[in-house]
Amino acid sequence: MQKENIKNSISGAFSDDFFIYPDSLKFSGDHTFFILKDSHGKYLGAMGPEKLIMESGFTDQVGNDISIDSVSGYIIRLFNRSYKNLKILLSIFPELHPTPLGTDATFGFGDRLGIANAAHIRAVKKQKAVLPVLAQQSIRELSKTGKDFKTVIAQSLWNILQEGYLGRWGADADHIKDRDHFIDAAEAGMTMYTFDTSEHLDETVLNMTGTRIKENYRLDTDYIKSIKKEYLDKKIELNGNKFIFNEDTIIRLALIYGRALEFTKEIFQFLSGKLGTFDYEISFDETSTITTPEAHYFIVNEMRRSSIEFTSLALRFPGTFEKGIDYIGNIEEFDRSINIHGFISRKLGGYKLSLHSGSDKLSIYPSFARNTQGLFHIKTSGTSWLEAVRVVASVDPLFFRKLFRIAVDSFNENKKSYHVNLDKSALPITIKDIDDKNLPCILDDRDLRRVFHIAYGMIIEKEKEQLMRLLFENEEKHYDYLLTNFKKHFDALRY
């Protein structure tokens, strides 16, 4: 059958109670697969000769077979979107698997609810500057949403099938701190591994005098001796700036970063033994230590000396990067910092710089894109969650007021998991005086954005069923809100 005839046959087989996602049709021999929905949920559809459909291995059928009047022996059968059925689809279409994306410009779309990636894909299709990392979740997010890495990848794949996305995409096991979670991520098939070094850094030496350092640390170890031999009195000129590694600087860098770099090597060797190719990101952003140019050079050079292959590096830039709001700080200072760091990354070569907590940091996007010259990765997550909450505010004011109460009441507990420079005493006790029509504007208030951002775990725990039903019933509005939001993000990257 011609593809156009197949489309017409599928469309004609269903009543107006069903909606077939037009970009979801995929063809393999005599089989045609597609995603459709009715008022109850979404399903996988399979069309083909009855014998082939019966022998395909798909399980968990929904409803009765539908005969195709125009083609003798052909049927349509619907199935639930189970993990087992997804695995069969992947055996037919292995190109759907996530892959490492290397040093291409990439953008991470955290999807805490597992339903936003469809809109993320639509946003990506409208531009050609970046490749998407669609399955991006941190250990913190997994614990709060009750998911695992396998589920995150599966949810992304169903969104990919729905939207007919054919491009490369990545799956990021974000902000992992321990070996066990790296094992879980590798077994699930993640393709990008972000090592959060924060628990392996020793920042106490920052406030110590040289005398106190000598009193509290052994400085005659083989490691310190090798560092001195490599760097002592080394002079480096970077973009018109000269840096000299004196003994005090060398010792402090070795003590701050040495243990983290050793564990970075251990994890790299583990992943290399278990996987083929993969993207490896090293994160220094969740610390109080702003990364100096000397530290940047030292970190990269030490990883190269240890034969650690890495794709991206997340540094701690000046300013404050709070969740779901714009950059807080001096933009000119950020520009100067990313200018020198961008130059260092290009001079040393082979990796890109990563911007974490990148949601809504639109004021610094132009500088970040310009100074990295397109060698960048950006992580977002909370901004997509907040657009889901905005949908609730626009269509169900009563439910939104309930979510507000949950978010405010649980604020102090939620704050334990996130750095948020905000006190509960500064929050409104009630929003009863705000008209229903103005409730979506609450999501533009920087304080309340942070309140809702960190409340996702509590809201999902208490109100997931109603929230998911509302978003399902208002799917196109949800997608439109996300598209509008990410247009702003992508527009800001066009420097």
Image (cartoon, rainbow, N blue to C red):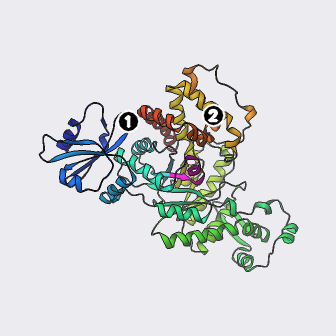
Q: Locate residue 207, reporting x and y percent.
A: 82, 59
390 sits to left or right of 87: right
What label sits on residue 487 in the rendered view? none
Comparing marks 2 and 1, which lies closer to the viewer? 1
Residue 101 appears in the rendering: yes
Residue 446 appears in the rendering: no
Q: Locate residue 219, reporting x and y percent.
A: 80, 75
| Mark 1 Cα-neighbour bin, 10 Å: few <14, some 14–19, many ≥20 | few
Q: Which amino acid does label 2 sit on?
A: Ile
427 sits to left or right of 372: right
Q: Which of 312 and 375 is in front in this view?
A: 312
In reply to whether residue 93 is colored magenta, the answer given is no
Q: Residue at x 46, y 42 (%)?
A: 116
Image position of 475 with respect to 286: above or below: above
Image position of 396 with respect to 229: above or below: above
User: Mark 2: which secondary structure?
Assistant: helix
What label sits on residue 40 in the rendered view? 1
Q: Residue at x 49, y 26 (%)?
A: 395
Kindly check if marks 2 and 1 are in contact, taking CB atoms under 8 A apart as contact: no
Q: Locate residue 35, reporting x and y percent.
A: 32, 43
Q: Residue at x 70, y 27 (%)?
A: 429
Q: Locate residue 385, reporting x and y percent.
A: 54, 40
- Separation of marks 2 and 1 at Cα, in angstroms: 27 Å
Task: Name the residue carrying label 2.
Answer: 406
The span picked out in magenta is 136-145
User: Mark 1: which secondary structure?
Assistant: loop
Which quadrant of the view contains residue 177? bottom right
Q: Nearer the viewer, residue 127 or 453?
A: 453
Name the chief secondary structure element in magenta.
Answer: helix
Q: Which amino acid does label 1 sit on?
A: His
Q: First in sequence, mark 2 or 1: give its number.
A: 1
